Image: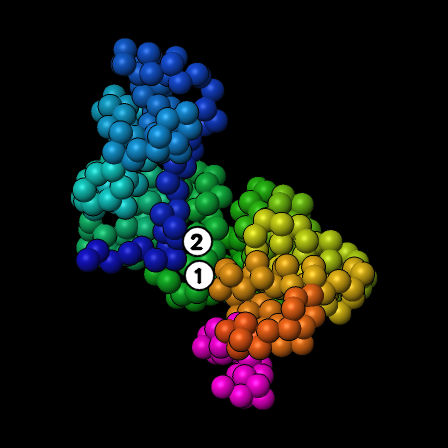
Amino acid sequence: MKKPLASLLGALLLLLAGSPVLAASLEEARRLAEQGDAKSQFELANRYMRGKGVERDPKEAAGWYEKAAEQGYSKAQTNLGLLYLAGRGVAQDDVQALKWFRLSAAKGDTKAQMNIGMMYLAGRGVDKNPQEGLRWMRKAADAGSTDAMLALGNMYLNGRGVDKNYTTATAWFRRAADKGNAVAQHQLGLRYFWGKGAKKNHAESARWHLKAAEQGYPPAQFSLGLRYAKGQGVKKSEREAAKWYRKAADKGYPPAQNNLALMYRKGKGVKQDYSAAAKWFRKAAKAGYPPAQFGLGKLYRDGQGVPRDLGKARKWLRKAADAGHKGATKALEKLGN
């Protein structure tokens, strides 16, 4: 079994990266693609990958990416490389992935350059070589790729492929944050909050979290909610905290759903509403978030917002306890097994 690129690649990080908004109609894209137009072949491939106007079909997508890639279309070469890396629509093949990344990288495609760097860092398709991996990552970052800047920041933050260095991590996060990368803005805010890589400054932390939150990044919206709930770097406001928790909760972010549920249960920043608390606890609990499973279990135990049901209380408390939640373990002991 192939070794994954783990956190370096994330969830196949840049699959369909750089794909434009689908502009041409399906009929027009297909007509031009069949006539050999590389851009249309690329667009048709994107449609098959996304299932836009056609049934999702990675194999068909790979075929059209390959047609465009063979004509030298760099974005198609990058995406074809990613399909080979993941084994989606084609047989998994690190060597083929690297081949297409190199062809695209030679044309200056920063996403391909970044992927080559990650392959060297992970030893996929090549002998593991952290220095060469770092060189490719820097090449992409120096060409303006905020994704590469962010990746470099995470590498130095976690000591993956390089020696851990909070100051260097912060510098890379700042470069990406200054270019508007919301994930980097959130990370930079965390560096200021914890005082790791930057002097602790809660006001500066909140400022960067606001920038990322306003771009709709759920973890930043959650972090900003925490800042308002605790009055860290901003004037304490439970109402503002609830507002930002809700924004992240509406996007399906479990920690925010849990905290919003807690506010409804306690009547902080919102009118007390046990039914609403149960609703938000349930959403996060079903996503596997232990604190919410604990919270939902307690509501069933006490009959708040839901009919009292000790069986369901035990079920959710057990899930949380099995995940290591100490409060749930104690609650279960009091209920009796």
Q: Nearer the viewer, residue 120 or 62?
A: 62
Seen in the picture, residue 109 relative to 291 is either above or below; the reply is: above
Q: State which quadrant residue 230 falls in.
A: bottom right
Q: Nearer the viewer, residue 254 or 98?
A: 254
In percent of the image, x 32 and y 51: which residue is there? 118
Q: Is residue 271 left or right of residue 335?
A: right
In percent of the image, x 43 and y 52: which residue is there? 151
Query: Does 208 lie within the magenta span?
Result: no
Residue tagged 1? 156
Q: Residues within 10 Å of mark 2 (few under 14, many from 20)?
A: many
- What percent of the width, then of the height, locates residue 271? 80, 61
Q: Is residue 176 left or right of residue 88?
A: right
Seen in the picture, residue 99 relative to 192 is either above or below; the reply is: above
Q: Nearer the viewer, residue 282 or 173?
A: 282
Residue tagged 2? 152
In percent of the image, x 24 and y 41: which residue is there? 84
Kind of residue at badge 2: Leu
Residue contact at pointers 1 and 2, CB within 8 angstroms: yes
Mark 1–mark 2 distance (CA, rounded to whole Å): 6 Å
- Total residue callouts: 2
Q: Nearer the viewer, residue 37 or 190?
A: 37
Q: Is residue 196 left or right of residue 232?
A: left
Helix, strand or loop at label 1? It is helix
Helix, strand or loop at label 2? It is helix
- What percent of the width, then of the height, locates residue 28? 39, 12
Kind of residue at badge 1: Tyr
Residue 99 appearing in the image: yes
Query: Does 321 lie within the magenta span?
Result: yes
Residue 204 appearing in the image: no
Q: Which contiguous range is marked in magenta?
A: 316-337
Seen in the picture, residue 11 relative to 285 is either above or below; the reply is: above
